[in-house]
Amino acid sequence: MTNWKLIISIAKTHLLTKMKSTVTASLGVTFGIGAYITLVSFMTGLNGMLDDLILNQTPHIHMFNEIEPSAEQPISLYDKFDDGFNVVHSIKPKQSQLKIHNALPILHYLKDQENVKGATPQLRSQIFYLSGSIELGGNLVGVDIMEEVRLSNIQDNIVEGSPEALKNTDNGILLGSGLAKKMSLNVGNRIQVSTVKGTVFPLKIVGIYQSGIAEIDNVQSFANLKTVQRILGEAENYITDINIKLFDLSEAPTMARQLERQFKIKATDINEANAQFETGSNIRNIITYAVSITLLIVAGFGIYNILNMLIYEKMKDIAILKATGFSGTDVQLIFMSQAMIIGVAGGFIGLIIGFFLSRVIDNIPFETEALPTISTFPVNYNPGYYFIGITFALISTFIAGYLPSNKAKKIDPVRIIRGT
């Protein structure tokens, strides 16, 4: 029967008598795990920030009327040309309205669905922003602002003012930060907007909106849905877009195709709308995990080399242990215990160092005009990464200890004592 108390005692004695080798081996584990935790926490935090920047501004499903040419041209309806090969040049888009037909009943239908977290109406309009002699083209989006706050976190991008201010002001506007800067306007100022038909409407700036994407902030602003309907002279059922948020994002592609067939309007799911961004995000994640795994593997080889040398330095001790009655299995367990002690100690210290360095990075100022809501570098404190780190430390030290200790198990003590 194995005497674990004696084996652990001998293992500790070996580690303490060769303190330099023990510390070196432990540091190999510590810095390998610490570097892994720091890198993966920072890189996944950064990737998460970039994903949120895009995905939080994108509905899971976007419904709208898409302008496109007719699937069937008039020539295809004329029987005399059935047997011929018909070529039609300069095809024009079919005449269609921008508003969604029966938008309000569709909204009620969507809100009754169990998998729908919320559905918000929008009215997008091409306008001109007028301030003094300055005239800039752009978009004005009519929204139900409090529903947008609930479903899309739009409040995180309001750098001045508040969503409540827009809700409580009939002629209010959340002006894009790029527009505000170009036109030297601030909260409380007034701006005039002109429709493509020439109608001019005065609005009060109740907030500044900054998404972090210059192409959006330079042209887009938000107002209450009823305000934009009034500017365009349209009825309360005039809605051009419906944005849908689901409880389960994975259902978006299937539901989008279903809604297209059911209501005969275009429905774009989040994966389709952000296909290029998703590709870039996946590549960044692959690079992050590839570098992280490489760090762990390099650390594992370092641990193996150090423990291998440690066992060869202990050859005479192995011979003495075997000569005094210890079996090969006992000798193997002694050196395996040393490896696991190094793995546990180095691994947990590595986790502490990784967490400390992550906290340091998390407190480094990160100030940029493009992302006003972010003040420090993003770090992801996912407990799963710490679990992976300590698990790898234990597995790598187990393997690093097993291979050389298995050789030690088979050593002939007589040959070592003789020096042959």
Image (cartoon, rainbow, N blue to C red):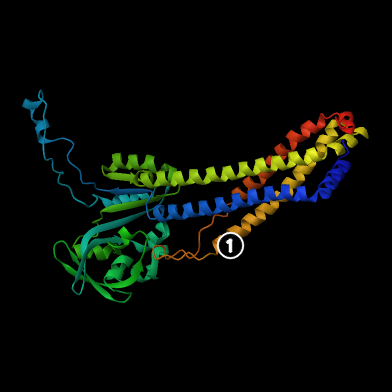
Q: At which x and y percent is residue 174?
A: 32, 67
Where is the N terminus found, in terms of image quarters? top right
Residue 176 seen: no
Q: Report the amino acid beneath label 1.
A: Val
Dot 1: within a 10 Å radius of its alpha carbon, few (fewer than 14), some, or many (20 or more) residues? few
Considering only vertical position in the picture, is 238 above or below 399?
A: below
Q: At which x and y percent is residue 248?
A: 45, 46
Label 1 sits on a secondary structure element that is helix
Relative to the observer, which residue lies in front, 177 or 139? 177
Relative to the observer, which residue lies in front, 122 or 22? 22
Considering only vertical position in the picture, is 379 above or below 286?
A: below
Report the residue that reaches farthest toward the top. Answer: 83
Q: At which x and y percent is residue 123?
A: 26, 58
**Residue of label 1:** 360
Residue at x 32% of width, y 45% of height: 268
Considering only vertical position in the picture, is 53 above or below 290?
A: below
Residue at x 62% of width, y 42% of height: 298
Left or right: 78 as drawn, with respect to 276: left
Report the residue that reaches farthest toward the right. Answer: 324
Residue 31 seen: yes
Tally of numbered discs: 1
Q: At which x and y percent is residue 420?
A: 85, 29
Left or right: 63 as drawn, with respect to 231: right
The image quarter in which residue 262 lies: top left
Residue at x 17% of width, y 41% of height: 69
Relative to the observer, which residue lies in front, 115 or 355? 355
Report the residue that reaches farthest toward the left. Answer: 80
Left or right: 5 as drawn, with respect to 205: right
